[in-house]
Amino acid sequence: MNSTQSPGAAVHIEDLDKYYGSFHALRKINLCVQRGEKVVVCGPSGSGKSTMIRCINRLEQHDGGRITVLGTELNDDVGNIDGIRREVGMVFQHFNLFPHMSVLENCMIAPMMVRKRPRAEAEATARGYLEKVRIPEQAMKFPGQLSGGQQQRVAIARALCMQPQLMLFDEPTSALDPEMIAEVLDVMVTLASEGMTMICVTHEMGFARRVADRVVFMDGGEIVEEAPPAEFFTSCRSERTRQFLSQVLGH
Amino acid sequence: MEMVIVAPPTPGRLEDLRRRFFATPLQTLLSLISLAIMVFVVWKLLNWAIFSAVFTTSGGPEACQAAAGACWSVIAARWRIILFGLYPFEEQWRSALACIAVVVMTVLSCIPAFWTGRRIALVWGTGAGLYYVLMKGGVLGLPHVGEEAWGGLALTLFIFVTTCLIGFPLAICLALLRRSDLPWISRTTGLIIDGVRSLPLISILFTFAVVLPFALPQWMVGDKLYRVIFGSALFFSAYQAEIVRGGMQGVPKGQEEAAMALGMSYWQRIGRILLPQAMRNALPATINQFVISFKETSLVVIVGFFEILASGNAAYGTGEWRFAYVEVYAFIAMIYFVFVFSLSRYGAFLERRMSVGER
Amino acid sequence: MISLLRNQRVRNTLLQVLYVGSLSGLVLACVMIARRNLAEQGITSGFDFLFKSTGWDVNFSLLPATANDPYWWYFLIGIVNTLFLGTVGLMLATIVGTIVGLARTSSNELARLLGRTYVDIFRNIPLILQVFFWYAVITHLPTPRAAHEAFGMLLTSRGLYLPIPNVGRAALVAAVVAIIAAVALPAWLGRTSRLSQPIGERLGIQLTAAATALATAAVILAFGRLPDLPLLDFPALQGLNLKGGLRIPPEFSALAIAIAIYGGSYIAEIVRGGFKAVGKGQMEAALSLGLSPWRVFTLVRLPLALRAMLPILANQYVWLMKATTMGIAVGFTDFFMIVALTINHSGQTLEAIGILMTGFLGINLSLAAVFNRVNKAIALKGNQLRG
């Protein structure tokens, strides 16, 4: 495995380029996230923010630049990719729970198959995390029987069961009914307060204000602005950021 | 307060009939025509098959031929040939047991409790193994009976089961290869699948039975029966692969991404996430494919096997029963009908259940 | 080396090369072995044999055939036979299927029951069993001496004998074309003028067109008539055999009947599915506009159902075309049987198999192309029916 220039960094992205055919989706992105840091990424749709965090665990393959995650460079080496995916948890917009497995099985499958944990241990961990996301009583149900908010909390628990060092959130609340957003955000806030390294793509500016160490604003495949929330919301430099903020906060 | 519940007036039985069948002139006409056809056919059929039919062998073929109705004596006289072909007479109980083993296996695999990859494989493996041991013998004190002596219904079932046993895993492999991200693999596989699908089954059976021995080294030629089974499995798998692929396309992309993000390997993703969901989507079409391929086993008669159709031809084709072809074909048709109809009803039931259940 | 194997790109390339390489290697090895084995039997590979005469006869051919004809001509005969049987079979199957399918969707319970029974029975009996059955039935018919007779047709164990007009071959073909035109022309006129003209006027034009075409056919027949013979040539017994008329051999009729009955049961289900796919809303809308039930059927229900059926119907037709290969079971010289006979007689195994595959690929592709065109032509424009 390759070591990196900044050994403390959880994620280090340098000059990242990504194309879909001839469409230039990400243009020379540079981003560094330290261990324990919480970063919120926002921006209008199509700005490349999802693409960027999907590059971090190689759900998308980047075309140029370097990505180093937890000290390992993400390249064509299959071992590196597997290693990084084991240590990076991800929560999706549409939950993506496995509908043919119970909630408990959803949480147990990866620790058992990937980390080779014995069943009893995996079940204990899973129950622990389900407790933590406040739905221990739903363990034996199937995802289809739960509400959206509950499903997303299961998805968070499932990712946590792998005991990742870094969590990626790809618009975790966008597909939820308004009354369910709070329960998911609460779980995320708790997680943040326990010191988890988090990168969240979200439009929840309240959440950003409360937990983020840094807010990153993307537009047109570029990082336009990067600042601590206090600064970001009060005195942003770029016109595009100001326009976006007025649209998100305006109503 | 007093509540008066007024029931809608229940129509009398006659009124009900009138409404259902004679509401308009067109309806009346349709009803009458249908009724006439039904009465005519049912009467003719009953008369032929039961009232004027001969059931015993006592009178011999002559008494039978003289009768106006069906001559079921031919079945009474020749049923063993039809069901077991040229299998040694004293050993035919083995053939019967083997058939029962296959039927039990099929019924078991229709029960949802057996729908995990491991259990289904266990059931089918045991069933096929049991069949093979019973039929072939050579162990447990059973005399050895070579494949060339297998025949009738037992052979039909054997070809069907082995076709599915080989064809199903092959179909899954083909489907996975076809949806591969690697362009040359998916293209080549697509070429194979489409090529096989564009050919008639008979031409594939013929190629495997007659042509392949030229194209293989001596040690690989093997028995004609197994070559034909392999050909039929290849044909089955080309169709089934497209069904499985359709099932896979019905699984949202996010499922695989979630599994990837959890660090699961390719085979774990396929085995635990993709296939279980894809097979569920593909179930009705799969049953349908089984039905079709059961009917298509009858085509091996063309490359010279003594399966149920050929044994039926033999049952009436020789000597004194030459006139009784309708009865023999009706009997074979009944056997096919029982298998195929129950399987397709089961498929329809599953389809309904799934469309009502979890979307 | 190990780190190289862990590299995704290297792995992907390697896998593809291995897969394609081993498959083509397998095919190549098979062909090499086959060529060697055949060479040992004194058979030289190559397509020269196509121009040698076959030395054997075919029992059914639309084209003139003798044992002196070369192999390529025989292959052509086979393809024409396959296409002919396939076309006749699928036309009959479509007629049967439409009737049964309509019965299955009718509002009359008895008709529905009848249709359902038909489908349940004939769908669940293998086609080849039905072919054998009908072949046995026809070959067990009385001998020519005791033939059943109706309207000048003779039904015997040697086949069905039809009266045929005593006209020249060219005139016959022209007349058939004219008769097809008599059916197709009004349909085409009806399509192009759509709803722009009043119904009565349109009907008039259509009838005129049909009548003109039919009259043309009559004129052609009258002029093409062979001199000194009666207008119709009736089959008649001469000695132990039947002379005259058009003989339809039992092999052909058994196949055509079986395909019609079996294929009809499948097409019936397709027809039913097509009608089921028409949304209730569309029909209610049409009824609420005050259209008569008949016009709702012809203007709304049928056109929409046809669009829903066509793609599935196309697959079924391709399947039926391939089902003609069952001809070999009863000895009808379709394309596949010609190939099998060629392998038997000439030993040119690889070439014959190659021709077989190319032939069926060609038939499949051209059928698919035809249906794609039809599909595109009648597809609903835009996406107003989605969702």
Image: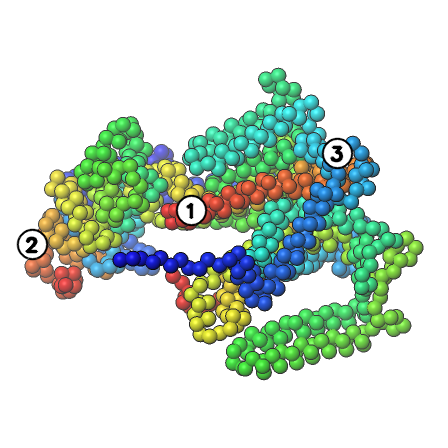
> Are callouts 3 and 1 both on one chain?
yes
Residue bearing the label numbered 3: B56
Residue at the spot 52% in from the left edge and 70% down from the top edge: C293
Q: Nearer the viewer, mark 2 or mark 3?
A: 3
Residue at the spot 79% in from the left edge and 39% down from the top edge: B64
The answer, for residue C219, to whether it is visible in the render is: yes
Question: Mark 3 Cα within 10 Å, few/some/many (few <14, many 20+)?
Answer: some
Q: Say which quadrant the N terminus of chain B sits in.
A: bottom left
Query: What's the coloring here?
Result: rainbow
Q: Secondary structure at mark 1?
A: helix
* Vertical position of residue C89 compared to residue C30: above or below: below
Residue bearing the label numbered 1: B354
Residue type highlighted by circle 2 = Ala
Residue bearing the label numbered 2: A230
Residue extending furthest right?
C239
Say which of B121 and B269 sits in front.
B121
Residue type highlighted by circle 1 = Met
Q: Chain of mark 3?
A: B
Residue type highlighted by circle 3 = Thr
Residue extending furthest front?
B2
Q: Chain of mark 2?
A: A
* C383 relative position to B340: left or right: left
* B35 relative position to A117: left or right: right
- Mark 3 or mark 1, which has the lower sequence index? 3
Q: CA distance from mark 1 to mark 2?
A: 53 Å
The answer, for residue C350, to whether it is visible in the render is: no
Q: Chain of mark 1?
A: B
Q: CA distance from mark 2 to mark 3?
A: 100 Å
Residue at the spot 27% in from the left edge and 45% down from the top edge: A146
Residue at the spot 75% in from the left edge and 38% down from the top edge: B54
